[in-house]
Image (cartoon, helix red, strand yellow):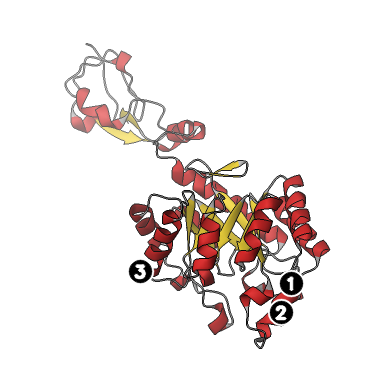
Amino acid sequence: MRIGNHFIDKDNLFFIVEEGNANNGNLNKAFQMIDLAAKSGADAIEFQLAIASDFYVKKDPGFERYKNREFSSHQIKQLVQRTSQNGIEFIAAIFSHNLIDSVVQAGCSAITINASDLNNPAIIDCTAKSGKPILLSILLANEDEIKWAINRLTNQGATDIILLHGQHAMASTGGPLLIDDTSLGYIDVLTNKYNMPIGFTDHTSYEWMPACAAAAGAQVITKHLIPSRKDKTPDWFICLEPEEMEDAINYAKMVYKSRMNTQKSLLEGEHVDKSIMRRSIVASKELKVNQVLQSDDLCFKRPGTGLEPSIYEKLIGKRLRRDLQYEEQIQLSDLEN
């Protein structure tokens, strides 16, 4: 699968920085978030986009909140352009089916179906028909709901789907997700069950958690970014600051690379360490020329620059060609054939 200029495969971890609503509808602030995401080493940035009247009933406090965060189609295009200029991908997390045409025309690289809309036919159907890769967030969902959403997407023609595992309890708890509740083992279950990439949405507060998800097999990871947690913008308590995000991405990508290496091979430095830390066959006492070696004539001591202890039995019964001092390494040239 391909998202923009990036491939989603076993060779590469795809890391998405979630903007975390830090912009609050301010275009320049959104530009700043794009720049910070790119500088941190992210592969993509995700923005939550909504038309308030499609999202909330007007009497709900959420209506005014999201009304203030709305971006016009022209502004969305500017955001996509700024993202492209930074060499990363623009992911649109859509909360309004009426925005899908706008983000597609603006050139977004993929569309995220938020966990809150996993059972929303209007969002699912329009996203499936967009022709864009889809990130399906399965937070808040049970097994039957996941199957329903996947079936609806595929029946509408969607082919490039990534499942994003995770948990969401911040609205009820007012705090970050606990480590015990991350269920990283479910990544393997999803991998074995569905023929599609599996990702992880990190709602903990820790910079090392993405590396744990990478070790558990996630091919795509999302994590919230904020310029400073002092700002107390939405989701601030699960966000990383720029330097923390840079570390998180580096750690996760290194761990992912390690997990994908399935070959047992020695590092160049291990050959040196091996000669220092292994043992060699040495004389356990003074030995004389023509002496026939017995087991108690030999012992194993560092350094490991001589014959390996594992072959000592082949030396038993051999006759010495020369005298050997106590603890002197035995060489094959010291033995008669």
Structural crowding at the residue carrying mark 2, measured as other residues with C-alpha within 10 Å and reported as few (<14), some (14–19) or many (≥20): some
How far is mark 1 from mark 2, CA to CA? 7 Å
What residue is drawn where x is 37% and y is 63%? 147
- Left or right, residue 160 beside residue 307: right
Callout 1: SS: loop
Amino acid type at circle 3 is Asp
Choose top left, top right, bottom left or bottom right for residue 227. Answer: bottom right
To which residue does mark 3 refer? 144
Residue type, numbered disc 1: Arg
Pointer 1 with pointer 2, Cβ within 8 A = yes
Q: Which mark is residue 65?
A: 2
Q: Farthest residue toward the bottom?
A: 59
Q: Position of residue 293 (x, y in %)?
A: 20, 23
Comparing 152 with 62, the one in front is 152
Q: CA distance from mark 2 to mark 3?
A: 32 Å
* Image marks 1 and 3: residues in contact by CB distance under 8 Å: no
Q: Visible in this render: residue 11?
A: yes
Q: Secondary structure at mark 3?
A: helix
Amino acid type at mark 2: Arg
Q: Position of residue 166 (x, y in %)?
A: 48, 66
Residue 284 at least partly seen: no
Q: Give the structural element (helix, strand or loop) at label 2.
A: helix
Residue that numbered label 1 is attached to: 69
Taking the spot 77% from the left edge, 69% from the top edge, the residue there is 25
Are dots 2 and 3 in contact, CB under 8 Å?
no
